[in-house]
Amino acid sequence: MWSELRALRDGVDLGTPPRDGEPVTLSVDGVPVTVAAGSSVLLAAGIAGCTVPKLCATDTLEPFGSCRVCLVEIEGRRGYPASCTTPVDDGMQVRTNSEMLTKLRRGVIELYLSDFPEGDIDGGWSQLNDTLDQVGVHRLADDHPYRSGANHQSGVLDLSNPYFLFDQAKCIVCSRCVRACEEIQGTFALTIGGRGFGSTVVAGQDESFLDSDCVSCGACVQACPSDALIEKSLFPGGYERADSRQA
Amino acid sequence: MSAPSNMRVFVPCDALSIALGADEVADRLVAEAASRSLDVTVVRNGSHGLFWLEPMVEVEVDGVRHAYGPIDADDVPELLDAGLLEAGPHRTSLGPTHSIPELERQTRLTFARVGVIDPRSLDDYLAHGGFDGLRRALTMAPGDVVGEIETSGLRGRGGAAFPTGIKWRTVLGAPATPKYVVANADEGDSGTFADRMVMEGDPFCLIEAMAIAAHAVGASHGVIYCRSEYPHAIATLEYCIDVAPQHGWLGSGIAGSGLDFDIEVRVGAGAYICGEETSMLESIEGKRGMVRPKPPLPALEGLYGKPTVVNNIITLASVPWILANGGAAYSAHGVGRSSGTLPVQLAGNIRRGGLVEVPFGITVRELIEGYGGGTASGRPARAVQIGGPLGAYFHDGQLDTVLDYEAIAAAGGLLGHGGVVVFDDTIDMAAQARFAMEFCAAESCGKCTPCRIGSTRGVELIDKIVIGERRSADVAQLEELCDVLEHGSLCALGGLTPYPVRSAMQHFPEDFGLGDRNSDQNFEQKVGESN
Amino acid sequence: MIRDRTLSKRRQPERPSLPADQASIVSAVLAANQLDPTRLLVVLQQVQHELGFVPNDAVGQIAVGLGLSRAEVHGVISFYHDIRTEPAGRHVLKVCQAESCQATGGRALTQHIQDVVGCELGDTSADGAITLEAVYCLGLCAASPAVMIDERPIARVTVARIDRVVESARSAS
């Protein structure tokens, strides 16, 4: 199954890991698609060739369901389930685009942008930039009511690790780094500290990456969709934090 | 006339009664009785829930309980002088307890024993029908026990109103083992205290209910997750789950049957979100209380990934009565799809605050005026929040709404856990809307984006609306944010926070600087198309 | 990313350890919970019950004792508002901030309490007598407003009543 999907996906991140199960056939935006039972709707949509925006989902990690941009509509079900955490069912009819879905995804992206350095959007090459392209929102309007709200733009900039850095201003708290550290590396050096708006990615007991149990495997850097964790080698002249959102 | 012998005098041990001075009253009664050489036993019962009369003292004369209240510790000597032990007249006399009007008019099924018995006495529990439901259940096949719950029409009293029988049937049918029964006692909604009253007033009922559930679904272990704000409830529960196995009501071979089941009390640690069932399961597993996506349903993959019944305390406390009296007898109460009774909790600015168990179908007005006697301040009631911090605010024109799940939903609200909080005309509804967002921000687990960031933006937007520099743009943005919260959140905390916010803005626009709903024809446009 | 040998073999930084008396209390708590990682929250509650708080220097010992990482233990500690990492004042006064108390003058009462105690919610008074905490509902809503000092609930709170409570908390040890 894994190899079939690898072939199929053609370099595309399908969002959730493939499963091994009986074939299940569903339709996504009218396109029939057959995947293994236990697969996510997000994966099925990817195989059907329908692009569903996503941020916290990647096919090397178990689904998490936190970012809420992969919402879809499913015939006969109420609401707007996250496609990454919704398993496929035989005969399921999925819609990945509608006026409401566009509105909800834009609404979520605006919330992200309200706590993200504006200067890092233009020319950015992260997965977040891809998602912004897909949703069609790149910055908050100058008079957007979300501007000047509370934010984490003066949060930690951790340069302690020789190979990568962590810039909290660009962290979208999707937990992909925390999950990669657990699921891929098994080191458990990272966690989310605090809760609610105060949730932040922290190493160890809220210490520098170097002082924590981090073994510099790089799984977290690989997993980060917003370049908050990024290789230092990309900044030969030294890293400078981008201008934060204008108030 | 000789002094009466072996008299029983009752003083509640319920936390709110204690908060109003019940311990001091009980201590004084013991001391006075000793100094007067009276043969008196002071029994610490639960509260009947008539809190404007607490601390209430009762005396049992010829098998009838007579009530006095509210009693201050300093009233005790004169109360004894007035002939308390013969139920003599006193300025605080309330007559026979069962004929106090606010109690007499109730339909007490779930709360039949609360206030009547000594919660720590197994004998008292057994003498009042305790374990009748479990005894009957143990003679029935598990599927038939579930069938009885299905017949009763019982729906989850925690807020989601999901049919309990369907949940139990799912767990019964799940092949994996072991299975668990989790009692959700993380009663965090402001204005609610029914769970607390059961745990403090009739704890063996909860134990009995969990044992019935264990038999019905094949569970071997139970957990009661109680919030840390309820130290008295925790102490009572721990006492009772210690006593029950000593008499064969928990442990192996319960009541001589083949049922093996034990219960553990776990205490919360200051997180409202842990009342959400998946967050609670994470917390019981020792983790951060982060909400899990559904599916998988906890009924299939719950505690430690195993099939788990998660029920609210009131849901469970309704179960022994249903098993003892039959599901049909229960569903004879109530209206439509809301069968049985609902323990309503009257709170906030209300003259006669307390617990009122009534069949579904009563109006809000009857509750807050008939039972509650209007506001405590004597000023007009302006707003009523029904269903806790995630419930909608109702205005005075909506008070004839009938209390059942469907009618409240049709009026744009939700019944939640049955809390009714009354506000008088001094309340600033913009401040209440702000608080709803603030509460969501304070208690968000932080997993999903709408709730994690959106709640903070909501607070900021309401502040801007009140200041009013760009009011219409800010109102429009708040509307959009409410849509994202309602439809995009992972769980009900973010999903329902728009209810109090929108209802406050729609019904009380003048508090937001949006004109008066009575005089301004355009206010609907200004507040958008909420609801 | 290339793995750096010197980095992965580097000496872990020296971490301060708990004083021996506290460490033995933590050990006893861990043993009483059978070193079961699913009992982490219970362990934290019991350590706090014994020591009054969960010292940062206890995290390593708890993590090793339960087979968890320090990050996991820190994540749980920082999630739950009840778990404190600094000692509280001699008394903890929880002041309800929720709707039922708001309906009965709770906002003004909170302000008064902060004025009388001399600190904000979440802080401890300068004399170390009282820590003020916000709480969202004590379940005493039929007789609001309500507070709880240590584990003693008080309902239908008035300014005069709270002044007496604060005064006696200050004078008591």
Image: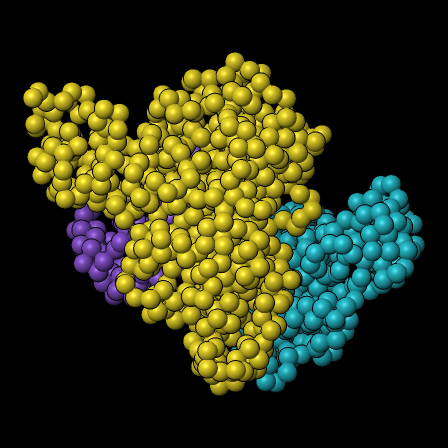
- Quarter where residue A33 is shown: bottom right
The x, y position of residue A221, in whole percent, is 70, 60
Relative placement, left or right, of A197 versus C53 is: right
Question: Relative to C118, is B32 above or below?
Answer: above
Chain letter matching colour yellow: B
Asked which colour scheme the image uses, the reply is by chain
**Residue C92 visible in the snapshot:** no
Relative placement, left or right, of B306 versus B246 is: right
Q: What residue sits 85% from the left and 62% below the top?
A: A29
The x, y position of residue B63, in whole percent, is 26, 25
- Counting labels gives 0
In depth, the one of A191 and A64 nearer the eye is A64
Question: Relative to B104, is B133 above or below?
Answer: above
In depth, the one of B491 and A126 nearer the eye is B491
Q: Quadrant of the C terminus of chain A?
A: bottom right
Task: Tell me what hue chain A is rendered in.
Answer: cyan
The x, y position of residue B123, in whole percent, is 36, 21
In depth, the one of B66 and A86 nearer the eye is B66
Relative placement, left or right, of A50 versus C30 is: right
Chain letter matching colour purple: C
Q: What residue sits 38% from the left and 67% below the top?
A: B382
**Residue B177 visible in the snapshot:** yes
Q: Quadrant of the N terminus of chain A?
A: top right
The x, y position of residue B483, in whole percent, is 62, 67
Question: Relative to B453, is C93 above or below?
Answer: above
Q: What residue sits 53% from the left and 59% below the top?
A: B413
- Quarter where residue B106 is shown: top left
Q: What residue sits 10% from the left and 22% below the top?
A: B3
Relative placement, left or right, of B241 versus B450 is: left
